[in-house]
Amino acid sequence: MRAAAAEEGIEFAEAAPQPQDSLWLDEAGFVSSLDVIFGHHKYTTHAHKLFQLLDSFSSGKVWWRQLICRLVAVGAKKTSTRAEVWKPLSEQDIKRLDHCKRETLVKLVCVEREDSFCYVAVSRGGRVGVYSGDMRLLHSYEDAQYLMMSASDRSLTVYDAATLSHTPLYCITGLPNIPTCMAYTPSSRSCDTSELAFGTERGDITLMRFLQPKLQLFHTKTPDAINYYFWMELPSPPHTSYCSITRWRKVHSRSVKRVAYSRGGIILVSCSHDATASVRIRHVPGKMDDYVFKVI
C-alpha cells in the first residue's frame, strides 16, 4: 500500500515511536527505594520478598503501578474484613461525659503511666474531667484556667487551659525529687489563695500555695513565650509575691502513691506502700495531730 501511494506521490508520516514506561525498577533499585522511604533497612528482607511477589514472570522488573495496585487491593481487603467484624453501636455503648454539662468537647488527652491510665476531657466552657480507662469520672474541675503536668525529669509544666491550643506558660525544673502524684484545691469565696500538693518517690510532700491564682501562678518574664525557672529560684523575689512553698519531709518511708484534699483544703490525705504509715491524714494548718493508718 505504501509502494502504490509512493508511485502516486503520496507520502505517509512516520509512525510515532511507542512510548516506553520508564517507571520500573529492578530488584536492587526497588529495595533501595523502600529503604529510603522508610528511612532505615529494617524491612529490606520484606522488600525482596515483595519484589519477587510482584514480579510473577521473573522479568527482573517491577512497575510502580504494580505496587500501588497491590497496596490498594490489600487495603480494600482489610477494610472489607473489618467492616464485616464491626457492629453498629447501640445507645448503651455510648458514654455521656457527666462533667461537661452538654458542652462541646474541645480536647481529649490520654495520660499513660507504667501503672495507670486515664483520659482528661476539656470542654469548650473550661470544664475539665479526669476519667478512668472505662470512662468513669474520677475528678472534675470547672472554669479551669491552667493544666499542670509533672515528669520524671523532676519538672513541672503549666499549660494555658483557657484556650484551645493549650500553650505552655511555665516550666519549673530541678525539683529535689520526682513528683509521683498531685492534688489541687482551688480558691474560694473565703480564701483568695489556692494550693497544689505533690508527693515524691522519696516519701516527701510539697505544698505550693498560689497567692494570686486568678491573676497568674508565677512571675512572668516573657508573656509571649514559655517561662523557665529553677526550683531554687521560687523562694526568692519576685516569685514570693506569687507563691510560697512548704515541704514536709519523710511523710512516708516509701513513694507517695496519691494525695487528695478534703474539707475545702483543710485536710490532706496521702497514701503509700509504707507498712508503718500506709495512710496519713494531716491537718494542713498544723493545729491538729496526724492520723496514721497501717495497712497490712
Image (cartoon, grey):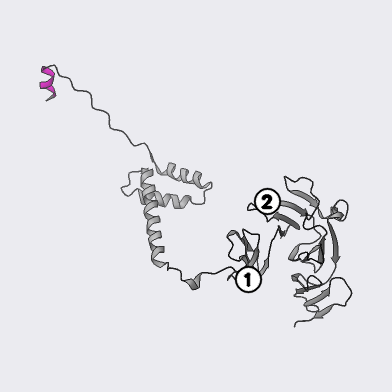
- Few, some or many residues within 10 Å of mark 1 (<14, 14–19, 20+): some
Identity of the residue furthest to the bottom in this view: 296
Depth check, front residue: 262 or 52: 262
Point out residue 27 in the picture as x, y percentages from the top left corner.
41, 44
Q: Is residue 22 magenta?
A: no
Q: Residues within 10 Å of mark 2 (few under 14, many from 20)?
A: some
Q: At 77% across and 77% down in the image, what residue appears?
A: 279
**The residue under label 2 is which amino acid type?**
Thr
Task: Please identify the quarter of the rendering in which residue 28 is found.
Answer: top left
Q: Quadrant of the C terminus?
A: bottom right
Q: Nearer the viewer, residue 40 or 84?
A: 84
Number of marks in the rendered image: 2
Q: Find numbered disc 2 in the image and state the secondary structure of the residue it sits on.
A: loop
Q: Residue at x 86, y 54 (%)?
A: 241
Q: Image height check: is 3 above or below 173?
A: above
Q: Which mark is residue 137?
A: 1
Kind of residue at badge 1: Leu
The CA span between labels 2 and 1 is 25 Å
